[in-house]
Image: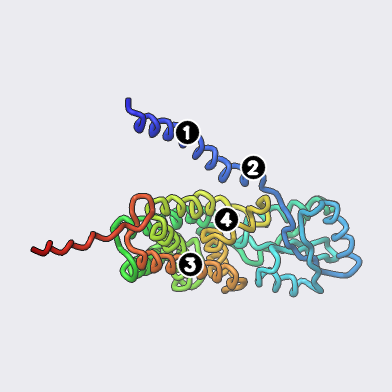
Amino acid sequence: MSATPQRRMTAAMVLVPVFAALALWAFVWPAARVAPRDVPIGLAGPESAVTQLEKGFRQRGDEFALHRYDDADAARAAIEDRTVYGALVAGPQGPEVLVASAASPAVAQLLQQAAAAQSPSGQVKVTDVVAAPSGDPRGSGLIASLLPLGLAGLAAGAAVTLMGLRGGRAATALVGGAVLAGAVGATITDTWLGMLGGDWAAEAGVLGLTVLATSSAVAGFAALVGPPGIGLGALLMVLLGNPFSGVTSAPEMLPEPVGTLGQLLPPGAGASLLRSVAFFDGAAAGGPLLTLLVWVALGMALVFLGARRGPAGPAGRPTPSAAAPRPAPIG
């Protein structure tokens, strides 16, 4: 067996466990460390009662970031604006728990448990201010939709690269594919499955923009460094972006800096933007929208930059143009 095949065989054997370890770290570690970390919630009611509630929550360490509100209406408004995930409202009949299962079913359940632990009877009244739709009451469909969106973006970026599309043609294919993917995605998730509850066109736009942020980044990386850029895109957008998104619980429940990093990648930003558009009338949509637009701008810039540099060779280097014909010898 020659040296080159031997090295390739060894490299393949080593890469498999390395990839397995990386995938396990990316997916299993955040899931195994899910816990509340400064999850923003509100407290409302009479000063003395709120002080007592606050004292009880302070004993839980840094699980919750507490915000005070004058009354239940103010707390509801904060939930609808996505400033807090939920709130406890102190009243003569005991505390009432305001939750938003559409924002995070996991946090809603956690807040109910924390409030029940402070109630003498162990029971509290619960009001779901922004409920998840009946077609997806536990948010399972929204969670499951994240990976297909990432894979669609990855496939689109890889297809543009492998088909040899460059510059304007590549950008047109990426935008057109994302628009169609958004329309198909909204038709399935909203019209058919009933797991979203907002404006259809806005949801289609969010889904399409999420796909475009991923596909343009993958195509841009590949245009800059060649086929290895597809692997880099897969690493960032799928292997890291999906488990770091916090869509299964909340970004604040992931270990740092995973929760913050996940919101800076298209899957996490796309999931947050979709929740805002589908359930909260666009509240708190600015941050994730900006993140997706930055990724699109970066990816498209790399696509056009790669086109100006010329086709990338197998190792990611520009392929030299064909040599100019030599002039015929004189004489």
Residue 219, percent across and down? 40, 60
Mark 3 or 2: in front is: 3
Mark 1 or 4: in front is: 1
Q: Residue 79 appears in which quarter of the rendering? A: bottom right
Count residues near mark 4 (Cα–Cα under 10 Å), then give few for <14, some for 14-19, many for 20+.
many
- Going from N to C along the chain, the mark reached first, 3 or 2, is 2
Q: Say which of 298 and 265 sits in front.
A: 298
Q: SS of the residue at dot 1?
A: helix
- Going from N to C along the chain, the mark reached first, 1 or 4, is 1
Whether residue 73 is situated above or below residue 90 in the rendered picture = below
Q: Amino acid at mark 2?
A: Ala
Q: Say which of 104 and 37 sits in front.
A: 37
Outermost left residue: 331
Residue for badge 2 = 32
Residue 95, percent across and down? 81, 61
Mark 3 or 4: in front is: 3
Residue for badge 1 = 14
Count residues near mark 2 (Cα–Cα under 10 Å), then give few for <14, some for 14-19, many for 20+.
few
Residue depicted at 62% across the width and 43% down the height: 29
Residue depicted at 23% across the width and 60% down the height: 323
Labelled pair 3, 4 in contact (Cβ < 8 Å) = no
Drawn side of residue 47 relative to residue 184, left or right: right
Q: Marks 3 and 1, how far apart in space?
A: 33 Å
Q: Marks 3 and 4, how far apart in space?
A: 20 Å
Q: Amino acid at mark 4?
A: Ser
**Tally of marks:** 4
Residue for badge 4 = 245
Drawn side of residue 34 relative to residue 48, left or right: left
Q: Residue 211 appears in which quarter of the rendering? A: bottom left
Q: Say which of 231 and 28 sits in front.
A: 231
Residue for badge 3 = 298
Q: Amino acid at mark 1?
A: Val
